[in-house]
Image (tube, helix red, strand yellow):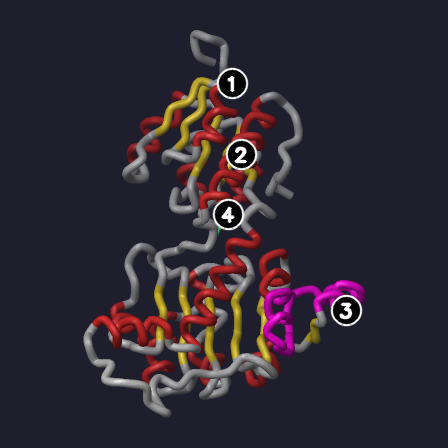
């Protein structure tokens, strides 16, 4: 506790004021920086002085780190994904962990669709073509892409974001297949016009594959050389989930061999570094983990993360607790 008797919380990066205001009402708040995340050493040095932590998805809170800060009364992660935190270790140490589901569903589904449209209709290539002064006039075969109507999108991971991607697919007259660890109930399948298939069928028959599953040991490099080789050579892969679900070296090779037509990637295994092979390919659209980056969504994430943190510190159940 601080001199004001308010709990002390560390926010590792500047978040929108909407969230900071909630925190300041109930806590003494320190924002580490608006420019960069704290290093592991900096976090370790700081955390003994705080009761709660509001972390970003780039703050690695693994077991060795958590074992040094068992006094923490809550970790509120400013993201829906929480693979940056060892949940089992946090649970064993009695540290509640929260995330921000729901509020970023539409923004993330939108970015999946932005990538899908950009890569299938060659938007980035077209933009470069115009800027580089290569355009000499309309041409019947200039930068031909793939029509979406009547094609099949395969959604891997049918949680909130996967379903929001599916909902958008219907507006484009696409057939929607999905694969999920657990099959959804009939009513949801009907509501979203979803066909459940096994992963192999989804990979072999989809014209676009959208990855919307959480990253964990099971999904690590799920899309490896073998699975990628089973995609249609005319198909596209969209990843807005986590980079390490895809074996990036294998994807670069598969794209070079034209085992698939292209990819749209928002996430990377070793962010912010990007496999250099992608940078040489025209048929890949790359964006820097922008899934939740709309002003509205970031405000709502800040509010939810702040409320989660305050509730935990006040002994109430947070809105979105991750620990089992
Ligand atoms: C998250 O919050 O986990 C996502 O990566 C948003 O893009």
Q: Give the residue pinned by disc 4.
A: 82
Magenta-colored stretch includes residue 179: yes
Image quadrant where residue 148 sits: bottom right
Secondary structure, mark 1, is helix
| Label ID, residue 25 | 1
Residue at 49 percent across and 31 percent down: it is 19
Q: Position of residue 221 (x, y in %)?
A: 45, 68
Secondary structure, mark 3, is helix
Magenta-colored stretch includes residue 183: yes
Q: Which residues are magenta?
A: 166-192
Q: Tell me the distance, in whole angstroms, between the alpha carbons under discs 4 and 2.
A: 18 Å
Q: Is residue 320 left or right of residue 233?
A: right
Do the residues under discs 4 and 1 have CB atoms within 8 angstroms? no
| Label ID, residue 190 | 3
Q: Of discs 4 and 2, which sits in the foreground?
A: 2
Q: Is mark 3 within 8 Å of ligand 1?
A: no
Identify the mark nearer the N-term, 4 or 1. 1
| Label ID, residue 36 | none
Q: Of discs 4 and 3, which sits in the foreground?
A: 3
Q: Position of residue 132 (x, y in %)?
A: 20, 74
């Amino acid at each position: 506790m601080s001199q004001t008797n308010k709990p002390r919380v560390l926010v590792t990066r500047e978040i929108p004021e909407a969230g900071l205001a909630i925190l300041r009402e109930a806590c003494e708040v320190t924002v580490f920086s608006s420019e960069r995340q704290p290093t592991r050493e900096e976090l370790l040095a700081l955390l003994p002085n705080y009761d709660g932590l509001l972390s970003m998805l780039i703050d690695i809170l693994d077991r060795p780190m958590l074992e040094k800060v068992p006094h923490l009364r809550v970790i509120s992660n400013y993201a829906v994904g929480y693979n940056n935190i060892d949940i089992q270790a946090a649970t064993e140490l009695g540290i509640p962990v929260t995330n921000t589901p729901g509020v970023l569903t539409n923004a993330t589904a939108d970015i999946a669709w932005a990538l899908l449209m950009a890569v299938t209709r060659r938007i980035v290539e077209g933009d470069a073509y115009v800027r580089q002064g290569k355009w000499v006039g309309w041409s019947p075969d200039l930068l031909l892409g793939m029509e979406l109507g009547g094609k099949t999108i395969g959604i891997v991971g049918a949680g909130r974001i996967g379903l929001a991607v599916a909902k958008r697919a219907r507006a484009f007259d696409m057939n929607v297949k999905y694969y999920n660890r657990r099959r959804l109930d009939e009513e949801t399948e009907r509501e979203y016009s979803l066909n459940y298939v096994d992963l192999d069928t989804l990979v072999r028959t989809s014209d676009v594959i959208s990855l919307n599953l959480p990253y964990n040991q099971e999904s690590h490099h799920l899309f490896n050389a073998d699975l990628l080789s089973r995609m249609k050579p005319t198909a596209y892969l969209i990843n807005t989930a986590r980079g390490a679900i895809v074996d990036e070296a294998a994807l670069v090779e598969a794209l070079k061999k034209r085992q698939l037509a292209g990819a749209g990637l928002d996430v990377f295994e070793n962010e912010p570094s990007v496999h250099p092979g992608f940078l040489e390919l025209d048929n890949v659209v790359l964006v820097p983990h922008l899934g939740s980056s709309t002003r509205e969504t970031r405000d709502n994430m800040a509010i939810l993360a702040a409320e989660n943190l305050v509730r935990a510190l006040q002994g109430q159940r947070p809105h979105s607790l991750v620990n089992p």
